[in-house]
Image (tube, coloured by chain):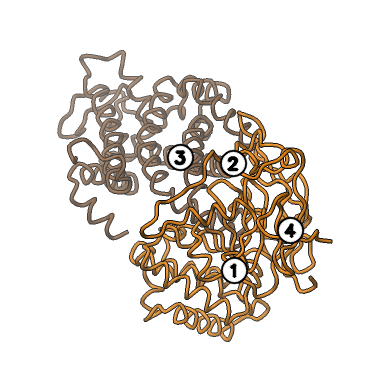
Chain colours: A brown, B orange
Amino acid sequence: MRRVMRKLAQDRAAMLGFALIVLLVLVAILAPFLSTHPGDVSDFHTHRRLTPPGEANWLGTDRMGADIYSRLLFGARITITIAVVAITVAVLIGVPIGLVAGYYDGIVSDLLMRLSDIFLAVPQIVLAIAIAQTLGPSIENVILALSATYWPFWARLVFAETRSCRNEPFVEAAIALGCSARRVMVLHILPNISSSIIVRTTIGMGGTILTAATLGFLGLGPPPPAPEWGRTIAEAREFLPMAWWYAAFPGLAIFMVVMGFNLLGDGLRDVLDPRLRRAHDR
Amino acid sequence: MTDELIAVRGLRVSFGSDAGIARVLDGVDLSIRAGEIRGLVGESGCGKTTLARAILGILPRGAARIDAGTIRFQGADLLAMPEAQLADQVRGRSITYIPQDPSTAFNPVFTIGTQIFDLMRFKSPLAGERGRARQEADRARIEKFLRLVQLPNPDAVLRKYPHEVSGGQRQRLMIAMALLTEPRLVIADEPTTALDVTVQAQILKLLKGLARDQGVAVLFTTHDLGAAYEICDRITVMYAGQEVEEAPVDGFFDRPSHPYTRKLLDSLPSAGTAILGIPGEIPRLIDPPSGCRFHPRCERTTEACRGERPHAALVDATHIVRCHHPLHEVERAG
């Protein structure tokens, strides 16, 4: 673990990604203290609408005259909640399915994997839109839509890794010494494939945030007045290009967070999975 | 034989593949007495490993099928035993296993100590007891066995990760682990093939000495006849999924009675003479030769050999051969 940390610390790109994620988390936690107009999450001041960035409103105001900077900070909470809960659920569904399907042979494994194939065959965003649309716009439903569409990635990954790990002699030796199937899966296989799960989860966070923002943009996210970043950009469309700050800053926020997770994920992969080193390291 | 520890009777195991069904074991008989060190020799693919796995009950699920036969261990039928009971009561407790390649037999993400203590947590001979006394007794037992397999400084070894010790040390650890739980039978599947020749001899001596001291029976599969000679009491020869000869180690080397055994011994390399080898190929198990499976490669083949599998016959009281035309006089076994 310490070795991983040390190596990661030497990777400047990964550290930048890590810093961006730490920033996101801090901003989300400290939103009430950092924001200049904490009330603007729900209040509106029509006399100030669409003010360009300036002293009173650092990043300008939106069509309701609410402070964009303050709304962005509170939006970070929504983004983190959606991403963390959706990914956790997806991992909790996908990993056990992949583990069981990979460890056993037979009809149940086939069924589980074909099921995940079906989910993978439909474009993620389309499926997520369908689910979110059917259930109605709310945070819970976005989370549900995302975890329902993302679990097959983990199931596939864990399935493949388990299959290759299952034939390792140490797994066979464990079975030969009378280790139960559940212990073999949880204690011998899972720790050996955890690095790929960690890497996939980190990179998956970025993708999930992007999809969550897309759902928000399409009006399927949490309903107004929630300061969801994707929906803010959607609102800003009609005021472009004059009120550029309205769309630019939420867009920048999404961009930075997604990039943060991708950079950290890449860095982690380089450290944890030497088989997949980036080209410049060779 | 009343004191037999394990008795395999008429075991048939087949593997399904795209090319057809391969009878990998076809009516194998094998019995081992308590405390006996039994060699199981034969060419690659003759079914040694499959037999070892069938006894442990770890044949690959889905691919392998047991078609017939019984495996009785200490009077209980292992094939009829439920999987949970096998895993809990038999595997790792009364039957243990030394794998072929020690370098990959430990889980790389845990220390050696973690893995050995974990085994003891479930399979310790003191399984009934709990608490500190049990823990200390287990610890003392682990240290004792690490010393017995000549690993100095057990504490340091236990704290290491598998990649931090040498191949020979890992195999010593495997032997220690296989003996820790007071087993009655240790299945050693070519335990020395992955090791250096110089280390092999030490490991074999160690295994033999410990098995003797602990009174443990060993089923030692190998294709190295020299290794078998070093440590075995009796040797069983397998050919194409069937046992063809079983003899005490002296009788095996002095009076080989099956033509295949003879050729196996002749193909041992020795200085100054050309290696003979055995003409022909190992038979395809999907479509094996009729009768005696060795007949296509044998010089003594007659019509009878093509017709039916030879019955077991006795060369002497302890030497069994299955051949229509054995190299030594036999009596029909009863």
Observer-nearest of A221 and B243: B243
Observer-nearest of A207 and A35: A207
Nearer mark to the viewer, of 4 and 1 = 1
Q: CA distance from mark 1 to mark 3?
A: 63 Å
Observer-nearest of B277 and A63: B277
Residue that mark 3 sits on: A87
Q: Are marks 1 and 2 in contact (CB under 8 Å)?
A: no
Residue that mark 1 sits on: B249
Q: Which mark is residue B195?
A: none
State the residue at coordinates (43%, 68%). Answer: B112
Q: Mark 4: which amino acid?
A: Val
**Badge 3 and badge 2 both on one subunit:** no
Residue with the most extreme left position: A55
**Disc nearer the start of the sequence (4/1):** 4
Q: Mark 2: which amino acid?
A: Arg
State the residue at coordinates (29%, 24%). Answer: A62
Residue that mark 4 sits on: B8
**What percent of the width, then of the height, locates residue B290?**
71, 37
**Disc nearer the start of the sequence (1/2):** 1
Residue that mark 2 sits on: B297
State the residue at coordinates (42%, 70%). Answer: B201
**Number of other residues with Cα within 10 Å of mark 1, as a class: few under 14, some 14 to 19, many 20 or more:** many
**Image quadrant of residue B188?**
bottom right
